């Protein structure tokens, strides 16, 4: 089992930055890949960024490339998402997710943190 707790969401204006954090516990941190999944109002969940278990490979959705950076700190067993140049379309609930079956097939989920970007 993996327990995930997100923090760092909030209400910001367009152009601002936020950093999301996800504290993980349970299974060894390097044994699973992780990602950030966004659910916008009325829309399905979308993987916006993912990182493999070793932190050596990352994925970004086209909509966030060049603006978001995913990283993990193995010593702190924490996943991060640095979000710069935020846009109103980045608004949504951001979930931290983890698993061993690849991005999009995560087995473990956090409770989500709300990010709201005003125009």
Image: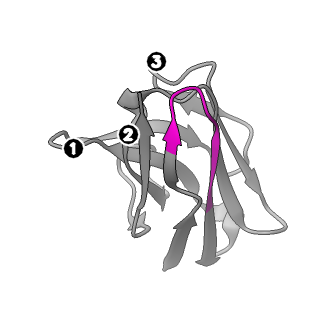
Q: Is residue 30 left or right of residue 113?
A: right
Q: Would you call the spot at circle 1 few (<14 residues within 10 Å), some (14-19), or many (20 or more)? A: few
Do tag 2 and tag 1 residues touch (Cβ < 8 Å)?
yes
Report the magenta residues as a range: 12-21
Q: From what the image shows, is residue 30 above or below residue 24?
A: above
- The image's colour scheme reads one colour
Residue 30 in the image, given as x and y percentages of width and height = 70, 61
Residue located beneath label 2 in the image: 91
Which of the 4 image quadrants contains residue 41? top left
> Residue, x 54% and y 41% (percent of image)?
50
Point out which mark residue 41 bears: 1
Question: Where does the C terminus fall, quadrant-wise?
Answer: top left
Label 3: state its secondary structure. Answer: loop
Q: Work out whether mark 3 precedes mark 1 in sequence or the reverse, and give the earlier one.
A: 1
Q: CA distance from mark 2 to mark 1?
A: 8 Å
Which of the 4 image quadrants contains residue 40? top left
Q: Work out whether mark 2 precedes mark 3 in sequence or the reverse, and give the earlier one.
A: 3
Residue 81 in the image, given as x and y percentages of width and height = 62, 45
Q: From what the image shows, is residue 66 above or below residue 36?
A: above
Residue located beneath label 3 in the image: 62
Q: From what the image shows, is residue 59 above or below residue 105?
A: above
Label 2: state its secondary structure. Answer: loop
Q: Would you call the spot at circle 3 few (<14 residues within 10 Å), some (14-19), or many (20 or more)? A: few
Do tag 2 and tag 3 residues touch (Cβ < 8 Å)?
no
Q: Is residue 114 left or right of residue 84?
A: left
* Front of the two marks 2 and 3: 2
């Amino acid at each position: 089992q993996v327990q995930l707790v997100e923090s760092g969401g909030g209400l910001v204006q367009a152009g601002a930055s936020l950093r999301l954090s996800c504290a993980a516990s349970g299974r060894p941190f390097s044994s699973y890949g992780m990602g950030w999944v966004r659910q916008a109002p009325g829309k399905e969940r979308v993987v916006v960024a993912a990182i493999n278990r070793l932190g050596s490979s990352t994925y970004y959705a086209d909509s966030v490339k060049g603006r978001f950076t995913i990283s993990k700190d193995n010593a702190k067993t924490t996943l991060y998402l640095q979000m710069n140049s935020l846009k109103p379309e980045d608004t949504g609930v951001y979930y931290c997710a983890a698993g061993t079956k690849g991005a999009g097939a995560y087995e473990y989920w956090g409770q989500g943190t709300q990010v709201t970007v005003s125009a």
